[in-house]
Image (cartoon, coloured by chain):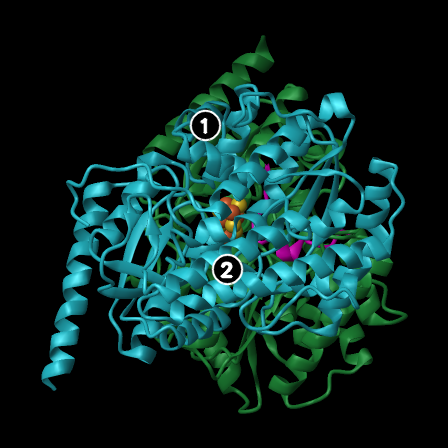
Amino acid sequence: MSADKTPIEVVKEPSMLKQKAMIAENYRKLTGAPETGRKVVSTYVPGNLNELIMCFDMVNNLPEINAIQNGMRQKSRGMIMEAEKMGHSEDVCTYVKADIGMMAKGNIAPNGEPLPAPDLLLLSYTGCFTFMKWFELLRDEYGCETVMLQVPYEGDGKVTENMRNFVVKQLKEEVIPTFERISGVKFDIDRLRENLRRSAAAEDDLVWVLQSAKNRPSPIDAYFGGVFYIGPIFTAFRGTDDAVEYYRLLRQEIEARIANGQGPITPEGDMGSEKYRLVVEGPPNWTSFRDFWKMFYDEGAVVVASTYTKVGGVYDFGFRHDPDHPLESLADYCLGCYTNRNLPQRVEMIENYMSEYEADGFLINSIKSCNSFSAGQLLIMREIEDRTGKPAAFVESDLVDPRYFSKANIKNRLESYFQMIDQKRQGAAAA
Amino acid sequence: MSTTKIINRCQALFDDLDFTAVGDWKAADSTRKVIGFMPVYVPREIIHAGGMLPVGILGGGDQLEVIHGDAYYQSYICRIPRSTIELGVTGRLDFVDGLLFPSICDVIRNLSGMWKLMFPDVYVRYFDVPQNYDDEIGGNYYVNELQELRSGLENVAGRAITDDDIRRSVAVYNENRRLIRDLYAFRVRSPWKAPSSEVYLLLRAGMVLPVEEHNQMLVDYLAAAESQDRAMRDNCRIVLQGSFCEQPPLNLIKSIELAGCYIVDDDFMLVNRWLFDDIPLDGDPIANLAAAFLHGSRETAAKYQPDGALKGKYLVESVRDNAAEGVIFAAPSFCDPALLDRPMLAKAMTKHNIPYISFKYAENSGQMQPIREQAGTFADSIKLWSDA
Ligand code: SF4
Ligand code: SF4
């Protein structure tokens, strides 16, 4: 597809329409909470306990998702600057500042209605240190109750009994009783089991979709497209019938694409022929999401696997939520999230993707905001280059702060990277 | 012994980026082992109980030329991990048999995995601590973590670490903590007699010396400083906050003092003062270490404060208890814990009418003029305000 092609309104697939309706409905529930009397809990994407939250009829608000929405709508810059004016350092995570700035500007949800103050902050401290400070800051602003769920880090690359027991114990003795008190709803473990059963069904289809990228051409883009595919499972829908239905539709659509030999859908329609297969590490930039994506599909580059799509849960190595061991499986889910895994595990995972998905190269989008992802990425890059012999590249941007997205720099870097892959291929063909 | 002589020795230890003193300690006996640790807290008692030397690894300061380390980190990550990598790849940490990475932030957390990849022969442990302070929940978890640490250290030491070994080590570290409390109390009483640059160097010496030797050094310094006459200056009294991990350059501490501020409390090398009270010598020593952590340890940005109403209270109390007149927030650039915590602490200061200023530094900051000016203006305004 050429750069000068006029953007067209792409026909939306049924799964896209379904997801859009689900998101709108959740924002409607959130902003309507003062009228309906439903209680609101805020929590994070990694370690999101949606199945448990549903047991108490509470509505789930995810501040990272609000920040992403504001980033994509070009509203985050003003919010971040507002927070910096209030004394928040320019050095810290912009999700936090976008959230605090959003609050200062009236906490308006994407549907134009104000978001209510949460009744509870579920501080699921999973894979990121900033989470702890973020909710301390929000608690300070809202003055609402906060319950902490500490998820130990897999420092030695494994989950020990001690770690799992600690998480389960916190769930039983602190998290669940707090939810019961705030919501007034008694915990029913069978309800949790039902939710988990639906989660597992959706997870099966999600994994099928992610692994469809092993086809040539890949029918999906597992990074730019991937962020839409993980949407329901990472947010307020895991464990719902809607999520099961969404992934069933999505799977059917991808099956049809494979049958037709089609590549991924892009914002400008079907991608042209697949020239480069990449594995990507790190979150995307949201403020120039389309520009960034276009730099790939214009060149025929498709992302066949990404680590960002594992940040809210790693399912493609076999883990499923398990209705027969409900609390233990919630613990294992949290413990296994991507950024809760140590660097050697992350390297192994990427190395596995490079070979399983027959990638031509490895790219890191390093995010200024996010030490959890970014600290150590340059070593990850070296390790992957050494282990696979494939070329790697490194670009830098930020999540929702447009001041750190330099379009020209990134484009140049990517163009020379694609040339490098070509040269490497020619060298290999000549050998 | 004079304070000058003691401080000269500390300065030499501080300047020595090859850790010669540690190398000498190790060379004296081929069975000796060294366990490094990074900020902010590890139970050194268990290392010591295994006959090993705990050594604080605090980055490279302003004298180390970082050549390799920068290739491992983006520009927006603080300095301490890159200078620590530099120390590692240049062989300056070859004496280290094990390295502990406490749970303080994502940078040090990820550095633990980097160390595993880069130095596969070293015992590497990410040292996790509870953010839940209930004995049955966070306490049980922590006791088991300590037992795992103990068995990992036993493997390095090549011998068992018994409860009695730990009790003996607890006694020595209780003594060390008492002496450091005395040192801080002495500085509060007469800050002109124990300048903070000297206090800092004394603490740094404790990061590399055997604790018994450090205890003697503290006794000697306190005796010498007590009897020494030094000019009292018309300085204001401040608490320095935020320097608990990447180290401020020594010149920064000196500059603050020269600008007219006596530092009467700080969060330098919190491992020394992490636990408030003596740990009991009877009973289960691991359970005692855990209880001390849960119920009698210092607050800092890396710890969760479960009660929002108490956020910042410790700093307000430090100002009050040490008769300080203001707070200087001095945090490393790009330090998430310190910088995310700062607005909440600053709010508590405002609520209690405690003046404060804030700045950032890097371990290799060279230009002190702006900091001297800022601290000088702060000191002047405090004096003006208190005279008014
Ligand atoms: S530091 Fe990274 S993981 Fe943590 S809140 Fe920010 S973006 Fe999310
Ligand atoms: S200086 Fe701050 S961000 Fe850097 S390693 Fe230390 S605690 Fe982490």
> Is residue B106 visible to us here?
yes
The N terminus of chain B lies in quadrant: bottom right
Q: Please report the residue visible at 68 percent of the width from the left and 35 percent of the height from the top.
A: B318
Whether disc 2's CB lies below 8 Å from ligand 1 is answered no
Q: Which numbered marker is on residue A84? A: 1
What residue does disc 2 label? A251
| Magenta segment boundaries in residue numbering | B263-276
Q: Nearer the viewer, mark 2 or mark 1?
A: 2
Q: Position of residue A187 (x, y in %)?
A: 87, 49
- Answer with the quarter of the image where residue A248 lies: bottom right
Q: Which chain is green?
A: B
Residue A75 appears in which quarter of the rendering?
top left
Disc with the residue nearer the chain's start (2 vs 1): 1
Give the side of residue B12 with respect to residue A37, left or right: left
Camera-nearest residue between B297 and B310: B310
Give the chain coloured cyan.
A
Camera-side residue of B386 and A392: A392
Residue sitting at x 67%, y 50%: A241
Report the Cα–Cα distance between label 2 and label 1.
43 Å
Q: Amino acid at mark 2?
A: Arg
